[in-house]
Image (spheres, coloured by chain):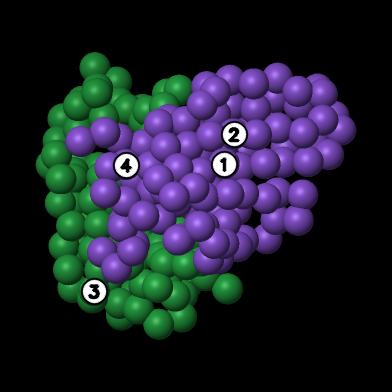
């Protein structure tokens, strides 16, 4: 069974640029959620995708957007990067209807200069 | 909205000591409750979960009981090891999971030999 994978592992961008982060869900899972974890804080929910549509969203602005593909992999796109976007971005996959248990990838660490 | 409060760290214990990390929550309805662990430089690993009142989740010697009357889900272990050193997050899922997980701020546990 393949776990959740994310790419890249690290990324450095400058303010105003755009970034795309990628996630492959665990085998058999059909739902992907994205989280932002600032240093020393707990993860904050960005949004969730199910059947290629956004299914729920946290308190993040529209410049945070995403996609889910037919193979259940997903992308997180962030436009007009700000310094405060520097964080660890975590992807989690789950199987709808199995008690909301989410399994996390190792994360992508984004630094915005 | 939903929220999770857990004890501030760092918590420093000697090897073989008894561990308790307190977690209380506020949520509508009947959330599922989770403990996740994060080792340095890694993503989150599911440690244990409970989906209804009075359920006890357990794994690797760790236990937590879902207490609806006190809205708590305290993490315990009878004898900690140096390898248990990590950051522990309490989290909840409500609303069918589409709102994502709500996390506490995390408790940094340090076990000294």
Observer-nearest of B33 and A101: A101
Which callout, 1 or 2, points at the residue further toward the start of the chain? 2
Q: Secondary structure at mark 1?
A: strand
The percent coordinates of residue B37 (x first, y second) are 34, 39
Image mark for residue A26? 4
Q: Which chain comes out green in the rendered image? A: B
Q: State which mark lies toward you, 2 or 3.
A: 2
Question: Relative to residue A65, is residue A3 drawn left or right?
Answer: left
For label 4, the crowd category at 10 Å Cα-Cα, with few meaning under 14, some 14 to 19 and many 20 or more, is: many
Mark positioned earlier in the residue sequence (4 or 1) = 4
Asked which quadrant contains residue A109, the reply is top right
- CB under 8 Å between discs 1 and 3: no
What subunit carries mark 4? A
- Image side of residue A13 versus residue A40, left or right: right
Q: Disc 1 marks which residue?
A: A75
Report the disc number at residue B52: 3
Identify the residue position indicated by label 2 in the image: A21
């Amino acid at each position: 069974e393949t776990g959740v994978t994310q790419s890249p592992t690290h990324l450095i961008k400058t303010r105003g640029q755009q970034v795309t982060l990628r996630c492959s869900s665990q085998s058999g899972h059909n739902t992907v959620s994205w989280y932002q974890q600032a240093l020393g804080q707990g993860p904050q929910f960005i949004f969730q995708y199910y059947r290629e549509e956004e299914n729920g969203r946290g308190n993040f602005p529209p410049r945070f957007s995403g996609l889910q593909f037919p193979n259940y992999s997903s992308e997180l796109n962030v436009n007009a990067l700000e310094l405060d976007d520097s964080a660890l971005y975590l992807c989690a996959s789950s199987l709808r209807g199995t008690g909301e248990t989410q399994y996390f990838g190792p994360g992508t660490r984004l630094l915005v200069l | 909205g939903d929220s999770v409060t857990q004890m501030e760290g760092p918590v420093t214990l000697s090897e073989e000591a008894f561990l308790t990390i307190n977690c209380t929550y506020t949520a509508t309805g009947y959330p599922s409750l989770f403990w996740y662990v994060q080792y340095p430089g890694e993503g989150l690993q599911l440690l244990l979960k409970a989906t209804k009142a009075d359920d006890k989740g357990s794994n690797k010697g760790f236990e937590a009981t879902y207490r609806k009357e006190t809205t708590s889900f305290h993490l315990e272990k009878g004898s900690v090891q140096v390898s248990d050193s990590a950051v522990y997050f309490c989290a909840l899922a409500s609303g069918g999971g589409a709102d994502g997980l709500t996390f506490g701020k995390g408790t940094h546990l340090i076990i000294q030999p």
